Image (cartoon, rainbow, N blue to C red):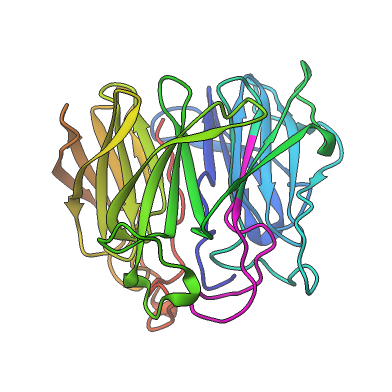
């Protein structure tokens, strides 16, 4: 894990004047007080309730964190808005993944739990890329499983339990990677690989692929995520490999997905309760693209590029009503590269670097 990004969406979260961050290496989470646009200060650091936290979410004073170590777990916290202090809501809850050979000694890149977030009805959604998957690369033979959507119902105090879980399988072993919700509460789910072979309508499995470029990605639209039977409504082939991070704009119903391997951003639109691909290469940088965030008014999109051993950057785009992107700035200040990682790369041709971004 030391040479890979956190492999998930939501390593940072903003709640009022508080900024929250996961610290995977120390198994903790840290809260910061936002004093101004240029000044923050550490308010609290507390155990994440598990090991290797990768994703965090906050709403109305309740915080949940996703830990990927071992079988994985979630843990809840209270957040005090006036000082950003954190207190535990109680014992963490195991994700209860089943590993034929036992839990891995460290998180499995590509296949671990990906993201945690609040649903439209204030429950908790945990996305598993592969429920109990055990291979560490795309092209190594071994066990990998379908991903799942795990919804935990919260009570009026923000508490949940393993018994409050509803699990829905995402078929085709397509490695669901990240999610967001549209303005109608429908789930937007990015499936990183295998949902479609690149540019072709028929699925291709991980075991059939010899190169990541053979593996197309997709975005699907789901209804009823808070029900006992969520269902997929629409799915679109992005025609690009390795779709990962995703963000939705309620301003114009546009959806944007980063593709690290392709160094590009694809744009889609939700219209008439269905998804439509607008442009596979709405933005192309040629460098690995990771997290993305909107400005508060949704007029601008910020995209994080992390080559690692060269110039890291934040690309700034003006968003048009037809889901187009126009580059207006490239920010490199404050994003130094790490020369010690020169030449050390994972199977995505990526190095360790900045893996999350928040806008406030």
Give the quarter of the figure containing the C terminus.
top left
Q: Nearer the viewer, residue 346 or 213?
A: 213
Magenta span: chief secondary structure: loop
Q: Name the residue: 56% across, 67% down.
A: 109
Q: Is residue 285 above or below residue 93?
A: below
- Residue 256 drawn at (x, y percent): 31, 41
Give residue 224's quadrant in the image. top right
Q: Name the residue: 33% across, 71% down.
A: 214
Q: Is residue 352 above or below residue 16?
A: below
Give residue 235's quadrant in the image. top left
Q: Is residue 140 magenta?
A: yes
Tell me if residue 291 can be seen: no
Q: Quick check: 309 left or right of 151? A: left
Q: Nearer the viewer, residue 7 or 18?
A: 7
Give residue 41's quadrant in the image. top right
Q: Is residue 2 magenta?
A: no
Q: Nearer the viewer, residue 84 or 67?
A: 67
Tell me if residue 176 can be seen: yes
Q: Nearer the viewer, residue 20 or 222?
A: 222
Instruction: Tell me where the magenta segment starts and ends, as one range.
Output: 125-147
Q: Name the residue: 86% across, 40% down.
A: 91
Q: Name the residue: 29% across, 64% down.
A: 198
- Residue 67 drawn at (x, y percent): 69, 51
Give the quarter of the figure containing the N terminus.
bottom right
Q: Residue furthest right?
A: 91
């Amino acid at each position: 894990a030391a040479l890979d990004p956190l492999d998930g969406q939501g390593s940072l979260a903003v709640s009022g004047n508080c900024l929250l961050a996961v610290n995977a290496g120390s198994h903790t989470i840290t809260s910061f007080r936002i004093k101004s646009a240029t000044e923050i200060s550490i308010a609290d650091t507390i155990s994440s309730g598990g090991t290797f936290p990768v994703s965090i979410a906050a709403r109305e004073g309740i915080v949940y964190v996703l830990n990927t170590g071992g079988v994985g777990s979630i843990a809840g916290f209270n957040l005090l808005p006036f000082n950003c202090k954190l207190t535990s809501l109680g014992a963490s809850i195991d994700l209860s993944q089943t590993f034929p050979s036992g839990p891995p000694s460290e998180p499995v890149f590509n296949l671990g739990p990906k993201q945690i977030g609040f649903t439209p009805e204030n429950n908790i959604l945990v996305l598993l890329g592969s429920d109990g998957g055990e291979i560490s690369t795309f092209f190594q033979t071994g066990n990998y499983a379908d991903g799942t959507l795990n919804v935990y119902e919260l009570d009026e105090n923000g508490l949940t339990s393993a018994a409050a879980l509803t699990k829905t399988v995402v078929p085709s072993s397509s490695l669901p990677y990240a999610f967001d919700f549209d303005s109608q509460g429908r789930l937007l789910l990015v499936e990183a690989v295998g949902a479609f072979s690149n540019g072709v309508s028929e699925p291709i499995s991980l075991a059939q692929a010899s190169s990541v470029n053979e593996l197309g990605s997709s975005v699907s639209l789901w209804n009823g995520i808070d029900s006992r039977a969520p269902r997929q409504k629409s799915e679109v082939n992005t025609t690009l490999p390795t779709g990962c991070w995703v963000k939705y704009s309620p301003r114009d119903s546009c959806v944007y997905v980063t593709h690290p391997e392709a160094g590009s951003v694809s744009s889609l639109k939700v219209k008439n309760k269905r998804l439509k691909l607008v442009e596979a290469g709405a933005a192309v940088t040629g460098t690995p693209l990771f997290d993305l965030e909107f400005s508060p008014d949704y007029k601008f999109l910020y995209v994080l590029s992390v080559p690692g051993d060269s110039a890291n950057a934040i690309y700034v785009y003006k968003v048009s009503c037809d889901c187009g992107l126009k580059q207006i700035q490239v920010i490199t200040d404050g994003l130094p590269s790490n020369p010690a990682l020169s030449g050390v790369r994972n199977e995505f041709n990526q190095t360790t670097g900045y893996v999350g971004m928040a806008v406030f």
